[in-house]
Amino acid sequence: MEVSQKRFDALHGRADRVGEISLRLVRGLYHFYLFMASLLALGLRFRWISRPAVVNVLIRQIYFTGVKGLPWVLVITLFAGVAAVYHIVHFAKSVGDISLIGSLMNTLLMQEIAPLLVTVLMLTRSGVAVATEIGNMHIRGEAMLLKSMGIDLDEYLYLPRMMAFTLCGLVMTILFVGIAVWVGGLFVALNHELNFNQFLTEIRKGTTLDGVLMMVGKGAFYPVLCCAMLLFEGRKVGHDPNQVPVHATYGVLDSLMMVALVDVIVAVLRGLL
């Protein structure tokens, strides 16, 4: 009887811990949703267009996130993108059906590889910097000073960074696909795998409006999701400098998990529909 009671108490304790962790997770996701929704609503009101200070921050963030990150995108594209194109063509030829080239490019390169690789690149290059910058601003009291001056932190600090991630992510995703297709096609032609014109013809046949819209949607939404998570974690630093790397790491890891989860959900929904 005593052994059974101890087992029951142990199971009860574990259930309490699981319930507590689940509640914290749900609460955190709810607060993150409110934060992200408020930023999206603020951006869609377009009041920031008439605020020169906000536009100036947006331009500087686009330069840092997009222009300075462009060489890295080119390098990744020339290696990963071209390799993906070559292997897709090689696979289609090995099974004796080159009509697969267009559909595989549409499904794999445009809808999966390009948005995910660009998002991971932005996270590793600019994501940590965003979370660290916001965290340090809170530690130094800059965020509190701006708030005391009547400046909306959401509009001045957070929104420009999220918009820069969105625009740069979308543009770099499109560039990734374009460069991968053209350079990959030339590489395939030079290796006598397939005629370049025939390669472009197969891609044109396999490309669908649904695939293009999915590429655009993922190329814009994944960076939004990541940047919102990084800002959300950066705000939680408080006044302890030791928490900056902790929350920056949490921001990057949580962003990766959120993107993976959304990608799986999208794939399942598309399969069901």
Image: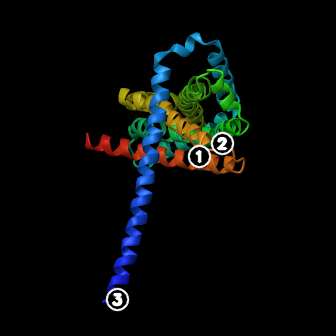
In the picture as drawn, the residue positioned furthest to the top comes out as 50
Which three-letter amino acid code belongs to the residue tagged 1? Val
Question: Residue drawn 41% across and 54% down?
Answer: 23
Classify 94 as above or below 45: below
Q: Which of marks 2 and 3 is nearer the N terminus?
A: 3
Q: Nearer the viewer, residue 162 or 239?
A: 239
Which quadrant would residue 214 be assigned to in this image?
top left
Whole-angstrom CA distance, mark 1 to mark 2, is 7 Å
Instruction: Say which element carries label 3.
Output: helix
Of badges 2 and 3, the one in the foreground is 3
Image disc number at residue 128: 2
Which three-letter amino acid code belongs to the residue tagged 3? Glu
Callout 1 crowding tier (Cα within 10 Å): few <14, some 14–19, many ≥20: many
Instruction: Say which element carries label 2.
Output: helix
The quarter of the picture where the N terminus appears is: bottom left
Q: Where is residue 198 in the image (x, y as percent from the top left)?
A: 46, 30
Q: Position of residue 184 (x, y in %)?
A: 57, 36
Q: Position of residue 123 (x, y in %)?
A: 61, 41
Residue beneath disc 3: 2
Residue beneath disc 1: 252
Image disc number at residue 118: none
Question: Residue drawn 65% across and 51% down?
Answer: 246
Whole-angstrom CA distance, mark 3 to mark 1, is 47 Å
The quarter of the picture where the C terminus appears is: top left
Question: Residue drawn 58% across and 40% down?
Answer: 230
Q: Can residue 92 be seen in this view?
A: no
Q: Do the residues labelled 1 and 2 touch (CB within 8 Å)?
A: yes
In the displayed structure, does residue 270 sit left or right of residue 220? left
Which quadrant would residue 265 be assigned to in this image?
top left
Q: Where is residue 124 in the image (x, y as percent from the top left)?
A: 64, 43
Q: Is residue 7 visible?
A: yes
